[in-house]
Image (cartoon, helix red, strand yellow):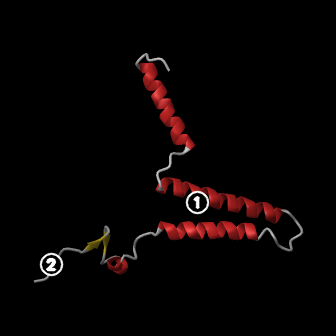
Amino acid sequence: MASTEVEHFNGVDVAEVPSAAWGWSRINHRTWHAVGLVGFIFLLAMLRGNHVGHVENWYLIGFAALALVVLVRDLCKQYQIETLREYRQRSREQINDARAKDKKI
């Protein structure tokens, strides 16, 4: 007799996502990082064009910077690199703990 249990692959129900059994339901971060880098390079490559005004250049630079910030943020989260904000927060907590225990900083 067949089982009534739903088969799961990587936490995804095969009834909802049939391709989960082949491993296609997982997000491949390396691919998205490559796409982000290619998009960043493409935006900067479009600076060399036949436009006269510089407003387009500022928009291209702004969107390229935004893409780079998102890419670096995602890489930092994936490889668990501590950001400056997290470092400052951890330092503040250590200082406050030392002050609470009347230790010299």
* Residue 51: assigned label: none
Is 73 on the left-hand or right-hand side of 50? left
Element at label 2: loop
Q: For mark 2, what is the residue? A: 3
Q: Earlier in the sequence, mark 2 or mark 1?
A: 2
Position of residue 99 relative to residue 52, above or below, is above
Provide residue 72's location: percent of width, then percent of height.
58, 56
Element at label 1: helix
Closer to the camera, 28 or 4? 28
Q: CA distance from mark 2 to mark 1?
A: 44 Å
Provide residue 9's location: percent of width, then percent of height.
30, 72
Q: Quadrant of the N terminus?
A: bottom left
Position of residue 81 relative to residue 62, above or below, is above
Is 41 on the left-hand or right-hand side of 100? right
Task: Name the outermost residue toward the bottom.
Answer: 1
Provide residue 16's location: percent of width, then percent of height.
33, 76
Task: Name the outermost residue toward the right.
Answer: 52
Specify few, some or many for label 2: CA neighbours under 10 Å numbering under 14, 14-19, or 20 or more: few
Amino acid type for the residue under numbered disc 2: Ser
Q: Residue 84 sits in which quadrant?
A: top right
Residue shown at 49%/54% (left/top)? Answer: 77
Q: For mark 1, what is the residue? A: 71
Q: Nearer the viewer, mark 2 or mark 1?
A: 1
